[in-house]
């Protein structure tokens, strides 16, 4: 038995701050047509695909310029052409955007649209919001998602769609194993992920050289450990002076990359998969019913302040202005110190791991 599905990662290049939505939607339509021409049945677009990544700028409360970045309906007049073209082509898609609800709540959101271009099959609101809330002008650019969005309130839903079980994550969600596991426990077979990830991380510049490696590392691990395909899609390139990684790809449940974009501009990569490949992992190594031990995982849902994430028996260092955590009640994991892990990046080669 096979369940074939053709997946496409529709990567966007930079979106200028002054780009109008009609111009951006026209680019999305071009990508959709390109993917459809290669047989795609489900096309995944990036996070906040309709605008530049506006959380890099500070806006005071009530600033109408901030309000203009959000969608109040989906589809709306500007996005309707994308939905219409999807219906004409018979191609479904996943689209990330900034949502403002009728009650005035704000979310970083993704929707899953059926091949008819009309039916919203599902909606997800980002849970792991990165960055900061307060004004930090010392940064070359800011990352104010915690200020401009609420934490998602829909949980981690999975939808029966496209012949399988489909879930969505957004950007920083992909770095947290709990995100994939929450979907995996519901039998997910395709995870759609859009991201806007800067090359530079101002609070931790020592991480910058590993950005592309970390991007694929977390998505490949999430795919393998939950027996699911993952489609990860970037808004890439130099956007308003900020370099953003690319690396959009489709990942197999084995963790291997099946297809990958090679540029930092508008580009699609397409591959045909068999959703039944997930079964080999879900019924053996990652058969959750047989092998998971949830009664031993109570720390995973304990309050963060009660834990010792550094494994040193001391509170984790906290940024200035944030209250320090109380000392953890226990020492290192398992009563022993774990050796540090070093990532060695070889010029022109793949990263290697050494302990």
Image (cartoon, grey):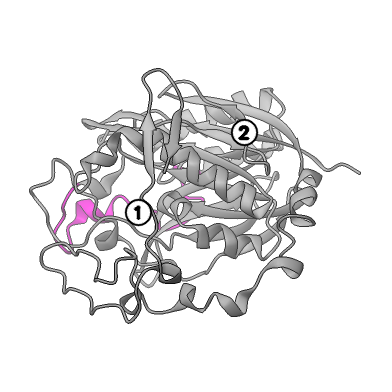
Q: Between 202 and 115, which is closer to the camera in this rendering?
A: 202
Asked whether residue 66 is drawn in magenta, I would say yes
Rendered position, 2 above or below 285: above
Q: In this view, does 88 lie to the left or right of 157?
A: right
Q: Bounds of the magenta span?
A: 57-79
Q: In which quarter of the image is the N terminus?
A: top right
Callout 1 secondary element: loop
Pointer 2: what residue?
8
Image mark for residue 18:
none
Question: Where in the figure is residue 249, as x and y percent of width and height?
Answer: 55, 33
Image mark for residue 70:
1
Question: Where in the figure is residue 34, as x and y percent of width and height?
Answer: 60, 23
Marks 2/1: CA distance? 26 Å
Asked whether residue 187 is drawn in magenta, I would say no
Contact, CB < 8 Å: mark 2 with mark 1?
Answer: no
Question: Where in the figure is residue 290, as x and y percent of width and height?
Answer: 76, 68
């Amino acid at each position: 038995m096979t369940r074939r599905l053709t997946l496409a990662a529709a990567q966007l290049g930079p979106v200028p701050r002054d780009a109008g939505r009609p111009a951006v939607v026209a680019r999305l339509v071009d990508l959709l047509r390109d993917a459809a021409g290669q047989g795609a049945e489900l096309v995944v677009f990036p996070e906040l695909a309709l605008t530049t990544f506006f959380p890099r700028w500070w806006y005071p409360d009530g600033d109408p310029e901030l309000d203009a970045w959000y969608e109040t309906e989906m589809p709306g007049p500007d996005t309707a052409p994308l939905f219409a073209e999807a219906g004409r082509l018979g191609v479904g898609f996943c689209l990330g955007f900034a949502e403002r609800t009728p009650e005035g709540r704000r979310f970083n959101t993704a929707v899953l649209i059926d091949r008819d271009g009309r039916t919203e099959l599902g909606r997800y609101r980002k849970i792991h919001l990165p960055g900061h809330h307060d004004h930090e002008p010392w940064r070359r650019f800011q990352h104010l998602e915690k200020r401009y969005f609420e934490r998602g309130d829909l949980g981690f839903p999975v939808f029966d769609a496209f012949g399988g079980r489909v879930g969505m994550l957004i950007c920083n969600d992909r770095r947290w194993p709990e995100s994939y596991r929450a979907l995996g426990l519901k039998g997910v077979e395709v995870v759609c992920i859009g991201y806007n990830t800067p090359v530079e991380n101002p609070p931790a510049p020592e991480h910058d050289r590993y950005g592309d490696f970390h991007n694929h590392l977390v998505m490949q691990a999430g795919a393998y450990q939950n027996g699911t395909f993952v489609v990860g899609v970037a808004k890439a390139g130099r956007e308003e002076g900020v370099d953003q990684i690319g690396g959009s790809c489709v990942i197999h449940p084995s963790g291997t990359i099946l297809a990958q974009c090679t540029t930092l501009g508008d580009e699609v990569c397409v591959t045909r998969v068999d959703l039944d490949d997930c079964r080999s992992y879900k019924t053996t190594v990652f058969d959750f019913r047989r092998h998971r031990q949830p009664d031993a995982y109570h720390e995973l849902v304990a309050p963060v302040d009660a834990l010792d994430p550094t494994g040193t028996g001391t509170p984790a260092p906290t940024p200035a202005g944030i209250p320090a955590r109380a000392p953890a009640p226990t020492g290192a994991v398992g009563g022993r110190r774990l050796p540090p892990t070093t990532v060695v990046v070889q010029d022109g080669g793949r990263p290697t791991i050494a302990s």
